[in-house]
Image (tube, rainbow, N blue to C red):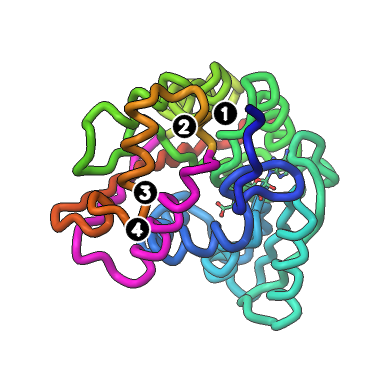
Amino acid sequence: MDQQANQYETTTGHNFSTKDWLNLHYKAVENEYASMVQSVGIQPGWRVLDAACGNGCFIQKLSELVSVHGRVDAIDLAPENIAALQSNVMKKQYQCQVYPMRGNIMALPYEANVFDAVWCSAVTQFLSNDEFQSVISEFIRVVRPGGVIAIKEFDGTLFYFSPSVPTLLWNTAGLMDEQKQTSFLSRPIQMKTVLKNSGLIEVTQKTYLIEKRQPLNEFEKKYISAFFDAQDVSWVTLDKIPENDRRIWKLISNPKSKQYILNEQGFYWREGHIVAVGIVPSH
Ligand SMILES: C[S@@+](CC[C@H](N)C(=O)[O-])C[C@H]1O[C@@H](n2cnc3c(N)ncnc32)[C@H](O)[C@@H]1O
C-alpha cells in the first residue's frame, strides 16, 4: 500500500513541515524553543542564516537577537513556506531586515564567509549521512572563521507519551527505515561528534526536554491532538504495523473512542531536542 500524503506534508515532500504544523508546534513549545535559540550565542549586529527556515517560526527570536543593525537571511526548499514568510516580512513584523529565499541547503546560493552564524532547526532529520555532510560543508563555507553553526534537532529516543501500551512507540520506531532510524534516533545523540569530525571546534551539545501534562493549555491541546489526528497517514508506515498495535494507535488517536489519549487524566507527552553548537576554525 502506498503511503497517503499527510496533510502536513509540503509540496516538496517533507512531512510535518507545512506552516500549519510548524505554527501549531511552535506555539505549544514557544518558551522551550526560545531558550534553545537564545543559548547559541548570537550577537546584536550579526548576519544570521536560518537554514531550512520553514515558514520562519524562529525568525522573530533571531531578529530580536541580532537586533536592528543585524540581518537574517532565510532559505527553504518549499515555495509555500517561503511565500508565508515573505508575507510576514511585508507586514514588517521583525526587528531587523529579513531576506527570504527559496533554495537548497545542500548548495547554498551565498558567497563564502558572509554569515556570522547559521541556525538550522529540524531539517537534519530528513537528511542521509552523506547529505548531512554536504550541508555541514556548505555551512562551514558560508560562515566566517570564528562564526557559529547551531544545529537543533528532534531526538526521537526521547519521544514518549503515556498512558498507552508502553512499547507502542518503540515497536513503531523499529519499523522505520534505516535512514529514518539514523536521522531520528542515532544521529541526534551523536551530533557533537559529527560536528567535531566535520572540523568544527569548541563543539557543545545540550539536550532540552519538553514535558506536558494535564491540564494542557489551548496551544498544547491543539498541537498534540493534531499529532494524533495525523497518525492514520503519518510518517510511520502504518501498513507494516502488527494488527494489535495498529488497533491501539487507532483507539488512542480517535477523539470518539473511550480510550482517546487526550481524555486521560494522567496524559503525559515528552519530546526532546538537542542543540549542538560549533565554531568555524580559521580556514
Ligand atoms: C520540520 S520543518 C522545520 C522548519 C523550521 N526550521 C522550524 O524549525 O520551524 C523542515 C523544513 O526543512 C525544509 N527542507 C528540507 N530539506 C531541505 C533542503 N535540502 N533545503 C532547504 N530546505 C529544506 C522543508 O521544506 C521544511 O520547511
> What's the residue at 38%, 56% (across, down)?
224
Which structural element holds mark 1? loop
- If you read the primary sequence from the N terminus, does the residue marked by circle 4 or circle 2 appear first? 2
Q: Is residue 14 above or below residue 203?
A: below
Which residue type carries mark 4? Pro
Magenta residues span 205-234
- If you read the primary sequence from the N terminus, does the residue marked by circle 1 or circle 4 appear first? 1
Q: Position of residue 50 (x, y in %)?
A: 65, 53
| Numbered tag placed on residue 200 in the rendering | 1
Q: Is residue 219 magenta?
A: yes
- Quarter of the figure with residue 27: bottom left
Which residue type carries mark 2? Val
Q: What residue would you read off at disc 2?
A: 203
Q: CA distance from mark 2 to mark 3?
A: 40 Å
Please tell me whether mark 4 or mark 2 is closer to you in this view: 4
Q: CA distance from mark 1 to mark 3?
A: 43 Å
